[in-house]
Image: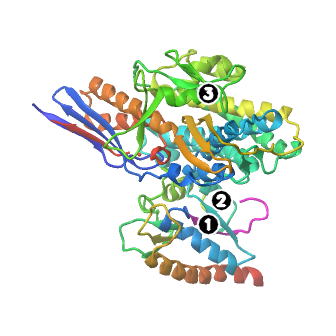
């Protein structure tokens, strides 16, 4: 975490130029508009070693990425990374050998996980070059923004009132 | 006759997606192939019609690990077309940002992707259980590199501050001082890295390689120099197309490069080291000697030592540049387009990255050619696999498969860039 960053961090992961791989970035941009203060919203390519750096010092972290687990397009996965390991191969599409699942598991071994880490995965359909999300993924982005906003609000409000 | 296949359908710990297949009949290797199945990305085609000054930002998108290499080769090629040569502090800042990219890329490959092969771990996560301090050192080294790219490039992934002619904004000397503090730690950590990897066990291996890289009269190469080889090639960058050819092979989405006269060649840290040992800084030369390396290292399994020596050099060079830096009067020199063809070649962490652009009178790109380092190493990697498996047919399949993957990772292949990568399949009949 760098200076000026909130202890509540939302990280959108992906490549907006690889169609559905941009789902995490799309969610992050919408959340940034909904929460202009109180939350640090970051966009990351998904390179794992850099990801570990992004949540250093943060206490509550939400990570949103496109998934390719074999479920139907638009399927929303929600994982509590503190409760169970993130399955490797889940966020397989990243062209980086060291990606989201590996970053979370490495951080776990190095004792560098934040106190809370929620991971949303949006099952993608088309990962070829392009800037359009497929329709199932667009709907899933709407749904994730809605439920993520509820979760973020629930952690900001007690802080704001304290 | 009994035949068998070694097959890895999805190669881990390489950048991008690909597969490896080796066919063995009796006691003879019949075939070794790298199959690349990331889709080709057609960057060369969609650069046509774009303005000359958009090229560095578009080509930076080819790779998340080495965007600087693409930006630098693009800038040099466009500037070559326009008859501009960059000197002084702007040139130094280009070397500095390249140091950052080498440090982050080399630290990632040494610690998180390649070291687990030598220490017998499936991946860095399992390695971190037993070697947490080493993994933490690797992550901090990588961050030190990222910080250089972030400061000079505006952000660490797909930097936005590099432009034809220089930078949009250049740092003040005092902006660079926090970098220097961390780089002093990084230089010590890089020296420790050289000592650490030198203790690994290396399979014996050697082939008749032709090493190819840049060579500059005064410095270890990043941005400029002549293209030279261990077999006597010595040409200007603009003569590249007369000596190198790219070919499509049916098993791969990536083009494979070869020297027209002599076939496969070897680019990257080992090529640079073997042809430029005399240009390394004294601390890097001394570290290499202490690690048991002579001025030439031909065993690709020892590339992890060479990469560590280069990471040390990059930390040392970055500190030297920061120490003598004075802020330039302007962040960039003016570049006016003209009808011309420009050529650029710089040393990406994985080896030479060649760009050629033809411009019209309005500065629009008529034609582009981009040759990433990994596509230049593909034939050499296949040759290594062929010879390695032939010499080690008696080892158990699991171990052989492991060592084949390790042999591929010797080259730190960036498959994302080359498509324009790995599963391992060993088939025995």
Task: Identify which residue is drawn at 44% across, 32% down.
Answer: B245
How is the model colour-coded? rainbow
Position of residue B9 measured from the top left corner of the image (x, y, whole percent):
32, 48
Which label sits on residue B309? 3
- Asked if disc 1 and disc 2 are in contact, CB closer than 8 Å, the reply is yes
Q: B362 or B143: nearer the eye?
A: B362
Q: Which residues are magenta?
A: A1-13
Q: Is residue B274 left or right of residue B172?
A: left
Classify mark 1: residues with Cα within 10 Å, few (<14), some (14-19) or many (20+).
many
State the separation of the CA atoms marked 3 and 2. 28 Å
Residue under label 2, please give it. Answer: A54
**Rendered image quadrant of residue B312:** top right
Q: Earlier in the sequence, mark 1 or mark 2?
A: 1
Residue B256: x and y in percent read 41, 37
The 10 Å Cα crowd at callout 3, few under 14, some 14 to 19, many 20 or more, is many
Q: Which mark is residue A11?
A: 1
| Residue found at x 54% / y 36% | B350
Q: Is residue A8 magenta?
A: yes
Instruction: Count neighbours of disc 2 (C-alpha within 10 A) and say few if under 14, some if 14 to 19, many if 20 or more.
Output: many
Provide the chain ID for the residue under circle 1. Answer: A
């Amino acid at each position: 975490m760098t200076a000026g960053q909130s202890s509540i961090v939302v990280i959108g992961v992906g490549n907006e130029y690889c169609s559905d791989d941009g789902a995490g970035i799309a969610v992050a941009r919408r959340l940034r508009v909904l929460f202009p203060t109180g939350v640090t919203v970051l966009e990351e390519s998904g390179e794992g070693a850099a990801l570990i750096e992004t949540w250093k010092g943060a206490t509550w972290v939400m990570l949103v990425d496109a998934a390719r687990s074999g479920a139907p397009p638009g399927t929303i996965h929600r994982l509590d990374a503190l409760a169970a390991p993130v399955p490797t191969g889940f966020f397989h599409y990243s062209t980086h050998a060291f990606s989201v699942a590996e970053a979370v598991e490495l951080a776990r071994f190095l004792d560098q996980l934040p106190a809370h880490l929620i991971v949303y995965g949006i099952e993608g359909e088309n990962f070829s070059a392009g800037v359009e999300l497929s329709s199932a993924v667009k709907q899933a982005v709407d749904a994730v923004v809605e439920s993520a906003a509820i979760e973020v609000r629930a952690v900001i409000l007690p802080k704001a009132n304290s | 006759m009994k035949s068998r296949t070694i097959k890895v359908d999805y190669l881990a710990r390489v950048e991008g997606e690909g597969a490896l297949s080796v066919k063995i009949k009796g006691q003879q290797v019949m075939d070794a192939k790298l199959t690349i199945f990331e889709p080709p990305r057609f960057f060369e085609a969609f650069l046509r019609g774009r303005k000359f000054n958009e090229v560095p930002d578009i080509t930076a998108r080819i790779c998340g690990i080495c965007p600087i290499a693409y930006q630098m080769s693009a800038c040099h090629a466009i500037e070559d077309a326009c008859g501009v040569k960059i000197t002084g502090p702007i040139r130094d800042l280009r070397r500095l940002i390249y140091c950052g990219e080498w440090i982050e890329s080399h630290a990632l490959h040494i610690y998180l992707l390649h070291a687990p092969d030598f220490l017998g771990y499936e991946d860095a996560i399992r390695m971190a259980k037993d070697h947490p301090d080493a993994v933490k050192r690797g992550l901090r080294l990588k961050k030190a590199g990222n910080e250089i790219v972030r400061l000079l490039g505006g952000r660490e992934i797909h930097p936005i501050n590099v432009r034809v002619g220089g930078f949009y904004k250049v740092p003040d000397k005092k902006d660079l001082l926090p970098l220097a503090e961390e780089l002093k730690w990084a230089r010590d950590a890089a020296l420790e890295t050289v000592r650490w990897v030198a203790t690994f066990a290396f399979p014996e291996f050697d082939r008749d390689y032709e090493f190819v890289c840049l060579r500059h009269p005064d410095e270890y190469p990043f941005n400029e120099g002549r293209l030279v080889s261990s077999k006597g090639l010595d040409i200007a960058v603009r003569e590249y197309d007369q000596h190198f050819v790219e070919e499509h092979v049916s098993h791969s989405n990536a083009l494979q490069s070869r020297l027209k006269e002599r076939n496969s060649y070897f680019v990257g840290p080992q090529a640079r080291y073997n042809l430029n040992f005399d240009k390394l800084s004294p601390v890097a030369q001394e570290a290499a000697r202490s690690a048991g390396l002579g001025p030439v290292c031909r065993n690709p399994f020892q590339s992890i030592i060479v990469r560590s020596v280069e990471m040390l050099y990059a930390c040392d060079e970055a500190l030297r540049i920061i120490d003598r830096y004075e802020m330039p009067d302007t962040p960039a020199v003016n570049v006016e387009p003209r009808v011309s063809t420009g050529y650029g070649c710089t040393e990406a962490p994985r080896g030479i990255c060649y760009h050629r652009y033809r411009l019209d009178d309005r500065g629009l790109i008529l034609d582009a050619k981009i040759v990433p380092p990994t596509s230049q190493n593909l034939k050499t990697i296949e040759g290594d696999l062929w010879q390695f498996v032939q010499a080690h047919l008696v080892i158990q399949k699991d171990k052989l498969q492991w060592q084949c993957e390790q042999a591929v990772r010797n080259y730190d292949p960036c498959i994302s860039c080359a498509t324009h990568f790995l599963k391992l399949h060993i088939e025995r009949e």
